[in-house]
């Protein structure tokens, strides 16, 4: 029962972190949208903003751009520190809640290179 309580606390903490990260991203997006001259449509309003990262660069747990992406047994990439915290109290996928066959994590080198290249081009 103590293990369940700890897992519930960790889950709530991770949800709070995720919500805070989403709020930060929304505030940053709103701030970027407010920079063009008042009343004039911005260039990014007419076309997708090139500074928006591809969805695959975003960790589904933290909702932030990954710096150390790893692949879990569910085939999904996560930020290493976030999925390690998750797996310290759970053995399920953060996305599907399905039981993971393994808690093994493998570096996603190609995704890391793509993220770094995208960041350098900004």
Image (spheres, grey):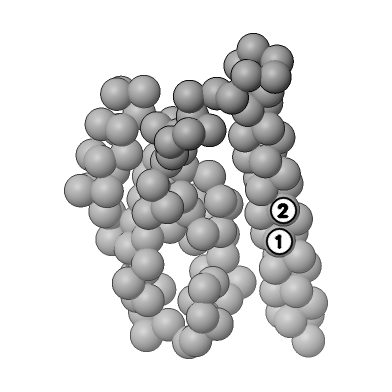
Return the residue nearer the eye: 43 or 77. 43
Residue 81 in view (yes/no)? yes
- Left or right of residue 50: residue 4: right
Residue at (37, 60) in percent of width and height: 77
Residue 100, position as x, y percentages in the image: 42, 82
Q: Is residue 70 above or below residue 101?
A: above
- Residue 104 falls in which quadrant of the image? bottom left
Residue at (59, 24) in percent of width and height: 41
Residues packed near mark 2 inside 10 Å, few (<14), some (14 to 19) or many (20 plus): some
Q: Quadrant of the C terminus?
A: top left
- Labelled disc at residue 15: 1
- Residue 10 falls in which quadrant of the image? bottom right
Q: Nearer the viewer, mark 1 or mark 2?
A: 2
Residue 80 in view (yes/no)? no
Q: Residue most toward the left? A: 110
Return the residue nearer the eye: 58 or 67. 58
Q: Gap between marks 1 and 2, in whole Å?
A: 6 Å
Q: Secondary structure at mark 2?
A: helix
- Left or right of residue 40: residue 72: left
Q: Which residue is mark 2?
A: 19
Residue 101, position as x, y percentages in the image: 37, 85
Residue 61, position as x, y percentages in the image: 56, 58
Residues packed near mark 1 inside 10 Å, few (<14), some (14 to 19) or many (20 plus): some
Q: Residue most toward the top? A: 37
Return the residue nearer the eye: 117 or 84. 117
Q: Residue most toward the front? A: 40
Residue at (79, 77) in percent of width and height: 5
Q: Secondary structure at mark 1?
A: helix
Q: Quadrant of the N terminus?
A: bottom right
Mark 2 and mark 1 in contact (Cβ < 8 Å)? Answer: yes
């Amino acid at each position: 029962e103590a293990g369940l309580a700890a897992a519930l606390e960790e889950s709530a903490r991770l949800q709070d972190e995720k919500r805070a990260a989403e709020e930060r991203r929304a505030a940053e997006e709103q701030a970027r949208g407010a920079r063009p001259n008042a009343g004039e449509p911005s260039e990014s309003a007419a076309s997708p903003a090139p500074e928006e990262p591809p969805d695959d660069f975003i960790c589904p747990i933290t909702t932030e751009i990954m710096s150390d992406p790893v692949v879990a047994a569910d085939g999904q990439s996560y930020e290493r520190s976030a999925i390690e915290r998750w797996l310290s109290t759970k053995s399920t996928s953060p996305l599907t809640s399905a039981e993971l066959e393994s808690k093994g994590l493998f570096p996603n080198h190609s995704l890391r290179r793509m993220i770094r290249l995208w960041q350098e081009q900004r």
